[in-house]
Amino acid sequence: MTGPIRRMRRRKLVRQPFPEPWEVILERQVPFYKHLCGRHRRRFLELLKIFVQEKYFIGAGGMQITDEVRVVISACAVRLVRSLGLSYYDRLTEIIVYPFTFTHGDQDVGLLGEAQDWGTVVLSWPAVIEGLSHPQSGHHAVAIHEFAHVLDRTDGVFDGTPRLKARSDYRPWALVMSRHFLNLRNRARVESIVLRPYATVNEAEFFAVATEAFFNTPQEMKRLIPDLYTELQKFYRLDPAAEASIECDASDTTLS
């Protein structure tokens, strides 16, 4: 939810022209942008302007925070909530960006991203770019993955179930998610084609990996696991499988 001061500030931001250099960044670095047309693009740009201004971007390990970093990461975040609204990111305050993989304390394993319980997302910038550059390759789509965890946390816990629209939505969600989670753990062929093995770690990781596939390989998910696609479509209120077949031309670009 947003208070009156935040709503007033957001209305002011929306009225401001969209910076033309940001449009260039989107066209060059964000492949899914070309599939957003008309009102869908206008809505995306409005939310992106707000997200960039409201969240703190912090460079770590020598990382320089540029407009490119802000706009690309914000685009990945806004992609998920284009129909849900920015209230799903109210607890998210800062995004820490590294120029390489990062570790915690004495850990030896490099991390690509992390969503922390207290409202921080940590990302490896090269991993963000890699996930955007090869959306259908099976690579870890790190930005989608971590922002999906933020959405998951909206009900108070990382459990694979974000805040759903209605109480009646929870039962079908649980049935579909648990069935495919267990199928994947049992190495079922269909789930293994669509979802990365990391989804078997727990229910929270299943939701995040499923979200990656929903946005990056939606037509494959819709064809092979239609009930999972339907549940995610109901939650996100988007149909990326349909959008994937659309490519906007220059006349569809509306700077607002």
Image (spheres, rainbow, N blue to C red):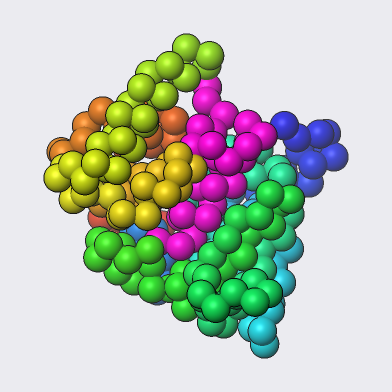
Question: Along the line of sight, which residue is nearer the eye, 251 or 9?
Answer: 9
**Residue found 51% across the figure and 75% down from its top:** 109
**Residue found 49% across the figure and 60% down from its top:** 143
Percent of width and height locating residue 94: 71, 60
Percent of width and height locating residue 12: 74, 48
77 lies left or right of 118? left
Q: Give, as a single range, the part of the protein colored magenta.
A: 141-165
Question: Along the line of sight, which residue is nearer the eye, 135 or 248?
Answer: 135
Q: Is 79 rendered above or below residue 73? A: above
**Residue found 45% across the figure and 44% down from its top:** 202
Q: Is residue 153 magenta?
A: yes
Q: Quadrant of residue 48?
A: bottom right
Quarter containing the N terminus: top right
Total numbered labels placed on residues in the image: 0
2 lies left or right of 184? right
Q: Is 33 rendered above or below residue 242? A: below
